[in-house]
Image (tube, coloured by chain):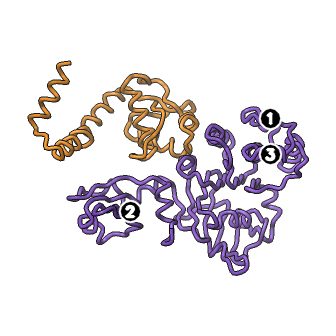
Amino acid sequence: MEHQDYMLEVKDLSKSYGSIAALEEASLNFSEKKIYGLFGRNGAGKTTLLNIITSRIYADNGSVNFLGKDITRHPEIIAANCCYMPEKHYFPPKFTVRKLLSIGKASFPNYSEEYAGRLCRYFKLHTEQKYNELSRGYQSIFRIVLGMAARAPITIFDEPVLGLDAVARDRFYTELIEEYTREPRLFIISTHLIEEAADLFNEAIIINNGTVIRQATVEELLSNVFYVSGGSASVDDFTKDRKVISTQMVNELKTAVVEGNINDEKRAPGVWFSPITIQKLFIHLTKDSSD
Amino acid sequence: MKPEFDNEKSIYLQIAESIEDNILLNVIEEETQAPSTNQLAVMYRINPATAAKGINLLVNEGVLYKKRGIGMFVSEGAAEMIRKKRKTAFNDNYVVPLLDEASNLDISKDEIIKMINKLREK
């Protein structure tokens, strides 16, 4: 990887819960003012990674550096520069949205009250409602409002669109891009809705079994993999010297997911090529033999 | 601008093509301002870097040019440039797949020409 000054450098993080390894030497980098998508299956280690980056828990091994400084030794850096909206957030249940937002205002130096108000109106979030009376979707909306309005240099959302309907999700994506063009900053967003969110990101990070298996632009990921289908003998002949990610057979018709750039391929007899989607690529990369 | 992208091509290529379509159809006239990176990013809710990549492609081809402090403009002669480029690609993009499918279906060259002539009469 070419040298770059990263805002956050995560190196060889490992973390186990008892005998279960949540992270195994996970390494990745985040540049300032880019939007990152974090993809991984349930239990892949996404939340553990985010909890360590934000100093909520400690890693067993490895390091996280913010502009060259180890955050374990300087947890105040994260407190001052990061707004993390975890999937599970235990806000005082009886507090109203208004009260919670006023706490946000006191906690984040760049917090914009004007923007928070605009977001509440945009998402129709009623500020007099108590947090525990909000529906699952509206709890997500509240986290979005607070996370966006905080305007922290590092803004992290774990599953921000959980429980949101299609219209609200689309509003979030649009708002994210608008806000990013106004106030560029580092966003890290984990989501299971890969296909619909993929175009938002500068880079996608795929984490599997506690390890980062891909970090690249979606464009790069997709330009390195494609489908080859045809009669099984023809497909086998085509793939014999190639790296095959997975294959599927229906009677004599075979489809293989192979590495390579579809645009560089010469038309071969008896097989045809087609592009893969990011969601399908994710599935092929992360499913295991028992799936 | 087209409302949605498909999965067949990279998003940045589709951004560039969409701007080209608008120039060809004279929706965006020559020597007028083209949509900005941020406008495209918000409109399609895509990362601005992707929108910028599409615009840069057109800048490199000379279809768009940058006016300092204002933004991107459509070059004089851009429509002709796009037409020329697409004519060159027409063979690969349209004629080759047409003949492939015709061959799969045992449609002869004469039959294809008949079909074209019939459409032309309308």
Dot 3 amino acid type: Asn
Residue B116 seen in the figure:
yes
Q: Which chain carries label 3?
A: A
Earlier-in-chain disc, 1 versus 2 = 1
Secondary structure category for the residue under label 1: helix
Residue B5 image point, x, y percent? 45, 40
Q: Considering depth in this image, is B92 or A139 the residue closer to the camera?
A: A139
Q: In this view, does A43 lie to the left or right of A242?
A: right
Q: Colour of chain A?
A: purple
Q: Distance between the residues labelled 3 and 1?
A: 15 Å
Dot 1 amino acid type: Gly
Q: Mark 1 lies on which chain?
A: A
Mark 3 lies on residue: A110
Q: Considering depth in this image, is A54 or B80 the residue closer to the camera?
A: A54
Mark 2 lies on residue: A257
Q: In this view, does A33 lie to the left or right of A110?
A: left
Mark 1 lies on residue: A117
